[in-house]
Image: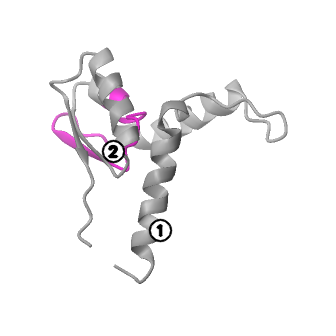
Amino acid sequence: MCEGSEEYLDKVTAYFNKIAEEYDKKQIDEILSCDELYYYVRDRIEWYYIEKYLPKKGIVLDVAGGTGRLTIPIALRGLKVVLIDISEGMLKVAREKVKEHGLEDKVIIKEAIFIR
């Protein structure tokens, strides 16, 4: 790793652990004009590009998968997904969402480990 990268990695991990519970909540911001339409368009554009590359069957790797925002819909399509993230807080939320959707047989969740 580069000099100082361990400290940066620790800061990033701490940041995402801190915001994990709120991460999926849609933030309505009048100044930035982030509203329901923004999230709808964002999701549609993402899926336009993601769907065309999903295999008909097999395993998908979701690196930096966070709370499973993309993992869940991919698994609901019948694919197996391996979700990896550095934040245990984000992974905790992802585990709850996987269980909530009954996708335990489709999703494997792992914490990213960096060799320091």
How packed mark 1 is, by other alpha carbons closer than 10 Å (few <14, some 14-19, many 20 or more), is few
Return the disc, 1 or 2, that comes first in the chain's sequence. 1
Percent coordinates x, y for residue 55 in the rendering: 24, 40
Q: Mark 2 points at which residue?
A: 53
Residue 69 in the magenta stretch? The answer is yes
Quarter of the figure that contains the N terminus:
bottom left
Percent coordinates x, y for residue 23 in the rendering: 53, 35
Q: How was the colour assigned to the protein in this rendering?
A: one colour
Horizontally, residue 52 falls left or right of residue 27, namely left
The part of the image, by quadrant, that contains residue 79 is top left
Residue 9 in the magenta stretch? The answer is no
Answer whether labels 1 and 2 touch (C-beta < 8 Å): no
Percent coordinates x, y for residue 106 in the rendering: 19, 28
Provide the residue span drawn in magenta. Answer: 52-74
Image mark for residue 8: 1
- Report the magenta stretch's main SS: loop
Quarter of the figure that contains the C terminus:
bottom left
Specify whether residue 52 is in view: no
Q: Which secondary structure, mark 2?
A: loop
